[in-house]
Amino acid sequence: MSLSPSELERYERQMLISGWGVEGQKKLKSAKVAVVGIGGLGCSAAIYLAAAGIGKIILVDKGKFKLNNLNRQILCWQRDVGKFKAEVAKEKLEALNPEIEVEAVVAEITKDNAHDVIGDVDVVLDGQDNWKTRFIINEYCVRHSIPFIHAGVSALHGQMTTIVPGKGPCFRCIFPKDPPEVEKILVLGATPALLASLQVMETVKLVTGIGKPLVGRMLFANGEEMVFETVEVKRNVECPVCSNL
Ligand SMILES: [Zn+2]
């Protein structure tokens, strides 16, 4: 695989980053990343994945954009209200970067369809707003040794961690019991934008091998007090999902 002159120009400013270069960019071009949930997190993550040159992006969401999504789901413009999120997002990402491939999947992840919907990818990004689906994705990712980059937001707060099966705790190790679901998550658009940017940074690091991923650590971003901290999270040797690894 080689990079075209236009790709070399498009990615010039990031390829000059130490340890990146043409080889790092080629790794991104070969990478397949799934964004599961095209909400506040998923929209912002998808834009930066596309801009960075991830070669194949799979966008999964069963829903359609609503007017009250517009404060944060930035791939939805006024004219897109009522249209399928995954399809609108695909169109926007392809307009931003025609060098990449984008697949829209209008579906909800279940235990039964996870393999068909997510498939064989290098990284999965969490764009979910519910715990139940996160646990399904976690189980799928552990079973297939796929890194899963979790993020969650509420108002001006967010959290994220990078799960690399076998190398650190999985999502079930960190949350042994299902946390209560929140009916209506309150959120300022800048909060998922922040966490999604960090998810993309982690993705790029995992694919290129640059830096140290957030494995075994949970980052808490408190935008109200503007405090960021990371807390160590450990594997559970009796975890029903990953203890066999
Ligand atoms: Zn586990």
Image: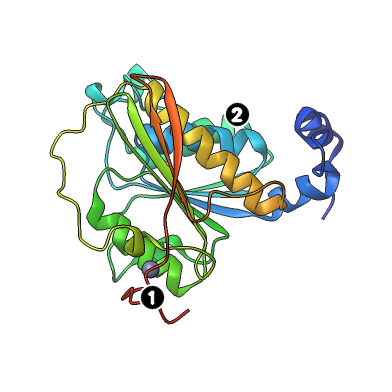
Crowding near pointer 2: few (<14 within 10 Å), some, many (20+)? few
Q: Residue furthest bottom?
A: 244
Above or below 181: residue 177? below
Label 2: which residue?
96
Above or below 92: residue 122? below
Left or right: 204 with respect to 198? right
Label 1: which residue?
237
Above or below 96: residue 106? below
Of the pair 187 and 161, the residue shown nearer to us:
161
Q: Residue at x 36, y 22 (%)?
A: 189
Number of the front mark, 2 or 1: 1
Q: Residue at x 79, y 35 (%)?
A: 17
Distance, label 2 to label 1, CA atoms, is: 44 Å
Left or right: 10 with respect to 22? left
Residue type at mark 1 is Val
Structure colour scheme = rainbow
- Residue 1, image x and y in percent? 82, 55
Left or right: 36 with respect to 53? left
Q: Does label 2 or label 1 sit earlier along the sequence?
A: 2
Q: Residue at x 32, y 24 (%)?
A: 156
Q: How many marks?
A: 2
- Residue 44, image x and y in percent? 46, 31
The image quadrant of residue 184 is top left
Left or right: 219 with respect to 62? right
- Residue 203, image x and y in percent? 58, 47
Residue type at mark 2 is Leu
